[in-house]
Image (cartoon, rainbow, N blue to C red):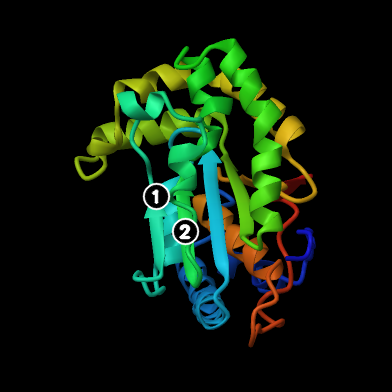
Amino acid sequence: MKKQSVNYTEKLPEYQRKREKVFKKNGKISRKFYEAESLRLQYELVKLQKWIIDNQKRLLVIFEGMDTAGKSSTIKVFNAYLNLREARSVALPKPNSKELGQWYFQRHLKQIPNAGEIVFFDRSWYNRAGIEQVFGFCTPDQHEHFYRQVNGVEEMLVDDGILFFKFYLNISKETQQDRIKDREKNPLKSWKLSELDYKSMEKYHEYEVLRDKMFRLSGTSHAPWCELDANDKKRARLNAVRYLLFNIDYEGKDTSVITGVDKRIVTLHS
């Protein structure tokens, strides 16, 4: 796999059309525009999966981010039209007593894709970089030991031919508070709430410090971090798909659709 790069461009549909046809008064993109543009990208994702299956490639995509940032919903966008026999989402529960005695990366690496498969991680080994450190689920020594190993682990994955992407969905504290309130009011979303969500909101600044440390120490040339401004979920989703498709040379790519990403939404840490 070639080294990932970011191509910032204004040649995106949201900037080629009249603003009132794309953006709402609050500055976020409209549902109608989003659904039309998302569908164009879905055709490309289906092409990508066919290429992966036909060529026995392996694609691993990690999603990290603040609580309520939209990790699960972004994965659903990627998965919407894929053959789910060859594409799966992994959200591991907290480790059991046996797993606590294993090498930290072991239970995650059991889930890496087989030939012809796509795997999406809804949180990953980077729990040790953030939430575990914030709430004392790991010791400071374990946290630092993680950073002594993670870049080597990821380099081995890439060296073995795995197409490996890392996304971080970032939101403001105000957006996080609004989304938690929305979940409180909406019975269809209330199951998403936990006591840890409220505690995480109180620890927002600590998460920010650890997030920046993570970018600094594990944003590498072989496995960079693609940070997405997810205060507008729809724009973040579109640009996550665009970034991934731009960086893979799959058969039949429509370069009129895959032109690059929005500088207002995407930041690369490498």
Q: Amino acid at mark 1?
A: Val
Q: Residues within 10 Å of mark 2 (few under 14, many from 20)?
A: many
Point 62% across, 56% down: residue: 164
Q: Which residue is mark 1?
A: 90
Q: Which residue is mark 2?
A: 119
Name the mark on residue 155.
Answer: none
| Quadrant containing the C terminus in the rendered view | top right
Question: Quick check: 112 above or below 43?
Answer: above
Point 33% across, 27% down: residue: 98
Give the percent coordinates (x, y) of residue 196: 36, 22
Point 50% across, 34% down: residue: 175
In depth, the one of 11 and 259 nearer the eye is 259
Secondary structure beneath dot 1 equals strand
Q: Amino acid at mark 2?
A: Val
Whether pointer 1 and pointer 2 mark residues with C-beta atoms closer than 8 Å, the reply is yes
Give the percent coordinates (x, y) of residue 115: 51, 69
| Quadrant containing the N terminus in the rendered view | bottom right
In depth, the one of 132 and 199 nearer the eye is 132
In depth, the one of 84 and 23 nearer the eye is 84
